[in-house]
Amino acid sequence: MIISLKRKFAFLCMPKCASTSTEKALRRLADIRIGGLPGMKHLNYRGYEKYVVPLIEEAGVERAEMKVYCMVRDPVSWLKSWWRFRQRDALKEPSHKRHQNYTAHLTFEEFFEMWETDLERPANVGTQRRFLMDSEGNVPDINIYRYEDIGSLIAAMESDAGRKLEMGSLNQSSPKEAGQLEIDLNRPRIKSEYDLYNSI
């Protein structure tokens, strides 16, 4: 997460949405940068409410003054990115502490089925909607952009920053594709994700 008190914005780093590249572009603007472990770098909106808001208010900035930005990705594309990411060779080793997340033995459809039915590893990646939920279970009125329209996000943040931002190459997963998909987009969990995505 990147927070600029001077320019009054916060950027929430949604996993698998170019967060590493965007974070690097914004790093020089940051008064506060929360990174390191994935759970810290990818602090969700509830974490922002609980930990960051008291901090910025202590610094003399009102919560209402802050613009909060985040990106979301086409839900199937987002899940495919997770599926590919968890195929990396390191996870193949049984001795790896996250070996249970390994997905190279799964088709995307199998991974999707595990995710949709909310089974545990290796499809325990959560949802983009939940990442954005506030403490009352609602998606707040913040500045959400589509990953596929990253240019609009950068333009908005450049306006806030008053300077040009240099975006590096995106941190992408392996190019392996899932092929022709046979998944039902009307199932409850994925439909809820598309309802959010299509509302942007």
Image: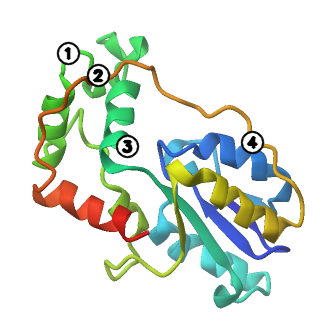
The residue under label 2 is: 102
Residue 118 placed where, x, y %?
Answer: 15, 49
141 is higher (above) or lower (below) than 175 = below
Q: Residue at x 59, y 46 (%)?
A: 19
Distance in Å between CA atoms under marks 1 and 2: 8 Å
The residue under label 4 is: 167
Task: Give 166 or 60, whichever is nearer the viewer.
Answer: 166
Confirm whether residue 98 shows in the render.
yes
The residue under label 1 is: 105
Q: Earlier in the sequence, mark 4 or mark 3?
A: 3
Horizontally, residue 47 falls left or right of residue 11, namely left
Residue type at tag 3: Trp
Residue type at tag 2: Tyr
Looking at the image, is mark 1 or mark 4 nearer the viewer? 4
Distance in Å between CA atoms under marks 4 and 2: 30 Å
Q: Earlier in the sequence, mark 1 or mark 3?
A: 3
Distance in Å between CA atoms under marks 1 and 3: 19 Å
- Asked which secondary structure carries label 4, the reply is loop
Q: Residue at x 12, y 60 (%)?
A: 188
- Asked which secondary structure carries label 2, the reply is loop
- Asked which secondary structure carries label 1, the reply is loop
Q: Earlier in the sequence, mark 3 or mark 2?
A: 3
Residue type at tag 1: His
Residue type at tag 4: Met
Q: Earlier in the sequence, mark 1 or mark 4?
A: 1
- The label number, if any, that marks residue 78 in the structure image: 3
Residue 173 placed where, x, y %?
Answer: 47, 26
User: Do the numbered discs 3 and 2 sit on residues whose CB atoms are within 8 Å?
Assistant: no
User: Do the numbered discs 1 and 2 sit on residues whose CB atoms are within 8 Å?
Assistant: yes
